[in-house]
Image: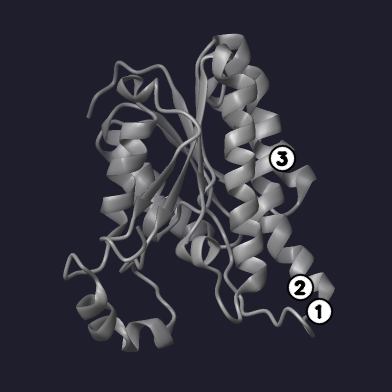
Amino acid sequence: MITNIDRCALITGSGRNIGRAIALDLAKRGYAIAVNGSSDKASCQSVVDEITAVGGRAVVTMGDIGNRDQVHAMVEQVSDAFGTVDVLVNNAAIRPDFDLLNGDEAEFQKVMDINFYSCLWLARACAPGMIKKGWGRIINFSGMNAQEGSTGKSAVSIAKHANWGLTKSIAKEFGRSGITCNIISPGTIVGEVNPPAISKNYGSLEQANPSGRLGTPEDIASAVSYLVGDEAGFMNGQLLQINGGVVT
């Protein structure tokens, strides 16, 4: 456990899967970690316990990222615990099916709030502290649905594509303040919990992947750790695809 980094990372949706892997990897590199979830506090606490058991620093900050007031409360809680949010990883998302022609607009708005507006709200809440410190890292997430379009997943595709525009805007506006913003587009990731329909198709998905395998949460976590490090300080406003070569 490295302990000489005076920086804090807030990772949304970090009680399991990709978010958990990111939290654990950044903790090993010395970052103080704010573990976020919307409902499963036990899973979030488990991640905190893993980190603190080996001498790391971590807190649970529960909150619905689709609610702007709760977003601001989360950032205040983390700032009280660790001073500032230096690294923001907007990982949490929902991926419901949506009929573009007949889908309920309230459901569409929920997807936009959680998958897109939360990233905007969190960036606006965290950026002032980053600007004051002269250093910050923001990581957003897109996806193959957003890059290619996807029948039945239009709400997710639209929200995740909007994150690409947000990423470029943040990079342009705050680069001179020492802040970088990049976006990751994961492929199919084998996590702790996956929809049964995807699990049944693992074999065919593996065969179709040029790398001959599916991704792991650790594949994404290692990329995040690189992007938030000082060595990636000149990488700004970029889309990083981690999918084994399915989408190029």
The way the protein has been coloured in the rendering is one colour
The quadrant of the picture occupied by the C terminus is bottom left
Amino acid at dot 1: Asp
Task: Report whether 205 appears left or right of 168.
Answer: left
Task: Report whether 11 appears left or right of 188.
Answer: right
Query: Label 1: how many residues lie within 10 Å, few (<14), some (14-19) or many (20+)?
Result: few
Residue drawn at x 64%, y 41% as measured from the top left: 166
Amino acid at dot 3: Trp
Disc 3: which residue: 121
Disc 2: which residue: 107
Query: Label 3: how many residues lie within 10 Å, few (<14), some (14-19) or many (20+)?
Result: some
The quadrant of the picture occupied by the N terminus is top left
Alpha carbon of mark 1 to alpha carbon of mark 2: how far? 5 Å
Query: Quick one: which residue is furthest to the left in this view?
Result: 212
Which of the 4 image quadrants contains residue 146?
bottom right
- Closest to the observer, 31 or 175: 175
Task: Report whether 115 appears left or right of 245.
Answer: right
Which of the 4 image quadrants contains residue 207?
bottom left
Alpha carbon of mark 1 to alpha carbon of mark 3: how far? 24 Å
Amino acid at dot 2: Glu
